[in-house]
Image (cartoon, helix red, strand yellow):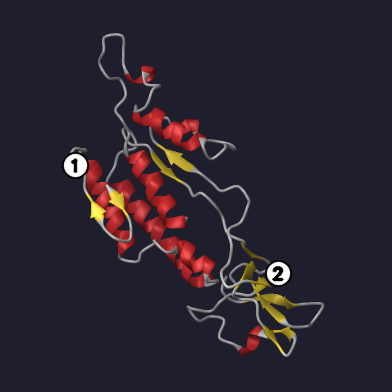
Amino acid sequence: MACNQGSIELNLSRADSLLVTELTVCLLLKRGRGGRIDHGHHEGKAKQALHETVEMDRAIGRADLLTSVHDTMTVVTADHSHVFNFGGYTGRGNTIFGLAPMLSDIDQKPFTSIIYGNGPGYKLLNGARENVSTVDYQDNNYQAQAAVPLSMETHGGEDVAVFAKGPLAHLLHGVHEQNYIPHVMAYAACIGQNREHCVSSSGAADLRPVLSSIAALLTVTRILC
């Protein structure tokens, strides 16, 4: 099944449980729940991006309820990060969408806890940095402050996390090149050339293909890229 902004296509040759899982996740995302994390970051709208992240987590949780860890490998990852960060020694309990508990020691102005390395949130007023205490930085569409002016925020370059559980999930740990992940998925799903581990000496299958791993990874990649 393909999950995208235009349509949902079902491949009825797959197992019913897999179809139900994929369809559930796709419908949740197509209803605006977790499908626009990347859009939020590119537009500098940190609040929207983080709320979308929570909704994505809920969608993955729903998929988890519809599958079994004994026969389904689930992989959640992304193909890039964003130049998104927070700092300013924010205290425990302080809203992440608020101001840092200190002023800049250069221009003596407050700054938001969340900040982008670049993006549309870069603003100057009369040649000086905007005083964010004079604007509604709690607004859902507020564009968080950015260090470099760009019409759209860019991707970052640090490592991204990969989470996995289920059969053969132990193959995903530590630091890997990104192209290693699809090889693990193919190995776990018993597709491609390396399938010796899937067949016993009698010819009977010892390991069921875990196609949900492919669905999960492609879904999340579609969300974040």
Residue hosting label 2: 88
Q: Is residue 116 visible?
A: no
Q: Is residue 56 visible?
A: yes
In depth, the one of 223 and 207 nearer the eye is: 223
User: Which residue is at the far top?
Assistant: 201
Q: Is residue 60 above or below residue 71?
A: below
Where residue 148 appears, x then y in whole percent? 68, 71
Amino acid residing under circle 2:
Gly
Q: Is residue 177 above or below residue 1?
A: above
Q: Which mark is drawn over residue 1? A: none
Q: Quadrant of residue 191?
A: top left
Where residue 178 appears, x then y in whole percent? 53, 40
Using a 10 Å C-alpha cutoff, classify the residue at mark 2 as few (fewer than 14 neighbours), some (14 to 19) or many (20 or more): some
Please report the residue visible at 64 percent of the width from the left and 86 percent of the height from the top.
133
Side of 3 relative to 173 (left or right) = left
- Total labels drawn: 2
- Tell me the SS state at disc 1: helix
Separation of residues labelled 1 and 2 (CA atoms):
50 Å
* Dots 1, 2 in contact, CB < 8 A: no
Q: Nearer the viewer, mark 1 or mark 2?
A: 1
Please report the residue visible at 32 percent of the width from the left and 37 percent of the height from the top.
211
Residue hosting label 1: 16
Q: Is residue 137 above or below residue 6?
A: below
- Tell me the SS state at disc 2: loop
Where residue 21 appears, x then y in whole percent? 27, 47
Using a 10 Å C-alpha cutoff, classify the residue at mark 1 as few (fewer than 14 neighbours), some (14 to 19) or many (20 or more): few
Amino acid residing under circle 1:
Asp
Where residue 88 appears, x then y in whole percent? 70, 69
Please report the residue visible at 55 percent of the width from the left and 86 percent of the height from the top.
136
In depth, the one of 188 and 169 nearer the eye is: 188
Side of 18 relative to 166 (left or right) = left
